[in-house]
Amino acid sequence: MVEIIEIIPKCSFSWEKLKEMRDKEIKFWAADGLNLLRIIEIDEKRSSFYMINQSGKMTWPLQYEKLEEVHNKIHITRPDDQENHLGWCSLTRFHNVSWLEG
């Protein structure tokens, strides 16, 4: 009998993951590689969140639904390119995109 081992980890993108990142004060680099970000507030009612960069500037409210749409498109359009998918499958790639605004 052959055992199948999953080599590529499953994507952890979710609303719960964003809350965990906020609670643990996880810092991450923006896609530009210049800004260190941290989620500071989550608005459950509006399904949005705010981040702050290393200089203390807070973002506009980012809509989770819009981020989820982009994330899903990545899964649909790049299913064969797992190495690049794992790089693109990241909140940091979309933090400053205007269509995430409410």
Image (cartoon, rainbow, N blue to C red):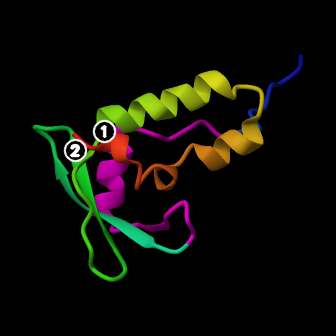
State the residue lying farthest toward the left.
Answer: 45
- Work out whether residue 28 or residue 66 is closer to the camera in this orientation and state it: 66
The answer to whether residue 101 is left or right of residue 69 is: left
Residue underneath mark 1 = 64
- Residue for point 88% across, 20% down: 2
The answer to whether residue 88 is left or right of residue 68 is: right
Residue 82 image-quadrant placement: top right
Horizontal and vertical percent position of residue 84: 72, 43
- Residue for point 65% across, 44% down: 86
- The type of residue carrying mark 1 is Tyr
SS at mark 2 in the image: strand
Which of the labelled discs sits on residue 93, or is there none? none
State the residue lying farthest toward the top.
Answer: 1
Residue 85 image-quadrant placement: top right
State the residue lying farthest toward the front.
Answer: 98
Residue 60 image-quadrant placement: bottom left
- Residue for point 40% across, 33% down: 68
- Work out whether residue 79 or residue 60 is closer to the camera in this orientation and state it: 60
Q: How many marks?
A: 2
Horizontal and vertical percent position of residue 50: 24, 57
Horizontal and vertical percent position of residue 46: 14, 38
Do the residues under discs 2 and 1 have CB atoms within 8 angstroms? yes
Instruction: Give yes or no for residue 25 being in the magenta stretch.
Output: yes
- Residue for point 41% across, 54% down: 95
Residue underneath mark 2 = 48
- The type of residue carrying mark 2 is Ser
Horizontal and vertical percent position of residue 79: 70, 25
